[in-house]
Amino acid sequence: MPTALRPFRAAAPCRGGASLLSLLIAAGCAGPAIRSQSPEVAALIGMESDVRLVGDFTAPWGVQPQRVERAALVTGLPGTGSDPPPSSQRSLLMSDMQARGVVEPNKLLASPSTALVWVHGYLPPGVRKGDHFDVVVEVPTDNDTSSLVGGWLMETRLSEMAVLGNRVRDGHVRAVAEGALLVDPVSGGTLDSKSRLRARVPGGGVSLTSRSIGLVLNPEHRSVALSKRIGDTINKRFHAVIKGTKRGVATPKTERFIDLEIPPVYAHNLARYIRVVRAVAVVEPPAGRHARMELLARQLADPVTAPMAALKLEAIGRDAIPMLSKELSSPDAEVRFAAAEALAYLGESSAAPALAEAASGLRSARPAALAALQVLDDANGIDALQSLLSSASAETRYGAFRTLWKLDPSLPLIRGERLGDACSLHVLDVEGPALVHCTRSTRPEIVLFGTAHRLESGLRAEAGTSIVVVVEGSEATVSRFAAGADDRTRTVPARVDDVVRAIIEVGGAYPDAVQFLQQASASRGLESRLAFDAIPNEFDGRGTVHDEANRERGDEPIEEAVPGDDAAAGGPVPAAIAAGADRADADT
């Protein structure tokens, strides 16, 4: 046995001789399919106890979102802004404005059409330079600004910030943000005073850097030899095309750190990728692969142990496809889903029907099922997703739409149209209940499920601070009245898609269209159901990764800084400064 492995073996002598009960509890596999203590099963379990996985030696690194923030200026407010009081936020903003050559910055800040705000967002794990992300905008508590409705966030440079020695310190600029403010939509179509002081810019942040992910070897296992061995083991299983060359994803940097590239198949599910990498076997008994797969196949047939068994089979690779495929016909829905999810990441489109079934019928599995369907970019995967667009569930329908859009935004059914620089509008000719969906994340977007979305005669609704929509009979009049500008009017059919287009044509923005839809729905002038962000606990693969031990204990994941590596590559995020840092942020 290699010297580098001896410390681990010495530290864990109990695994090889553990009782069956304790082994099953530790592995989370006490299901009926493997409860038999026959000599055959006992031998398989004894063999499995000698297997050492990547996760036994390492912990994930670079998997926490990185907070970036800054004081910023909002303009275009209809007299609802204020002159901010002296503060660290004002000093930061003044410095930025002076650096940009703004003339008379104090006069600009004093205008009621402007407001000082605090902007923050999170660079997700694995983000690439140029990727977009959402930003949150808030008015500090000691300011007199009364509303952000109608505002525009001026270009802002975002960086990591911390309080060191009672002074605010900022690091390198990591992103920029800009765009129209979408004040938080609420079901009633009205906003309270606090809601008016908080807004979002969907997709308004742009990353200026790329973040790496990797593995940190546990202190008792650090050595150059083991780092290399783990890297070689991972590279036998995972490859990616990097700078035009296909090579392994793992690059051992030091005796304690292994850098990981992200294969395209896992680009939208980094949490799954990390879990599968950590399930790759570094040490297996001689000729033990076949026996181990036999044990995993038994575990896969049991709904209690199926998720972890499927993950380990996925880590083995294509040799496990026959065993996974067999369980697509299991009588248990959770077993079918576990097998189908693993098969999708192994490139088997036969998993598509089972994944569509899980997205529709297993609510807890819906985000993971949709993420797996996104991997299947062939006819089977696309047909399965399109079948979900007519579901009665808004979550399933919009989840399927967003997955299709990420998979191929040029697909005729979901392609839609771009309304200037304001937003995208998609009218889907599908069956099912009429649904209008708006989003506060990723990008400004309105999706209409079905083609008939009529507005009731007698409706009068506002779209922002200067646009009014009046519906009489089968026609809607969209009028814009703004000081210092010519009045603009459009008369269109009284349908949602036509009115949204008209709002943008007369000079409105995405938040104006959303406000109109809110008010139309609240006043019962919209026949269709209106929904926002209809994907609960959406998993886009770019969030926090919990390892199995932390998941079982309920602990928060812990990231370890790796000396010599740039914090921008994914190190711990410094404490945010006081401006907004201690306010709960339920949206992030």
Image (cartoon, rainbow, N blue to C red):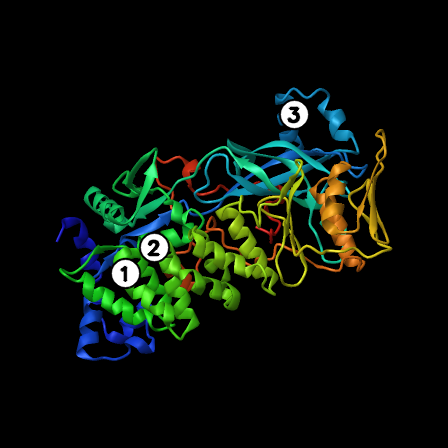
> What is the CA distance from the residue labelled 2 to the residue labelled 3?
51 Å
> What is the CA distance from the residue labelled 3 to the residue labelled 1?
59 Å
How many numbered callouts?
A: 3
Mark seen at residue 346: 2
**Amino acid type for the residue under numbered disc 1:** Ala
391 horizontally vs 26: left or right: right
Marks 1 & 2, CB-CB < 8 Å contact = yes
Tag 2: Cα neighbours inside 10 Å, few (<14), some, or many (≥20)? some
Vertical comparison of 574 with 42: above or below: above
Residue 486 location (% of width, % of height): 85, 31
Tag 1: Cα neighbours inside 10 Å, few (<14), some, or many (≥20)? many
> Which element type, helix, strand or loop, lies under badge 3?
helix
Q: Which residue is mark 3?
A: 97
**Amino acid type for the residue under numbered disc 2:** Leu
Q: Is 250 or 455 nearer to us in this picture?
A: 455
Q: Residue at x 34, y 51 (%)?
A: 59
**Amino acid type for the residue under numbered disc 3:** Met
Q: Which residue is mark 1?
A: 320
> What is the CA distance from the residue labelled 1 to the residue labelled 2?
9 Å
45 horizontally vs 243: left or right: left
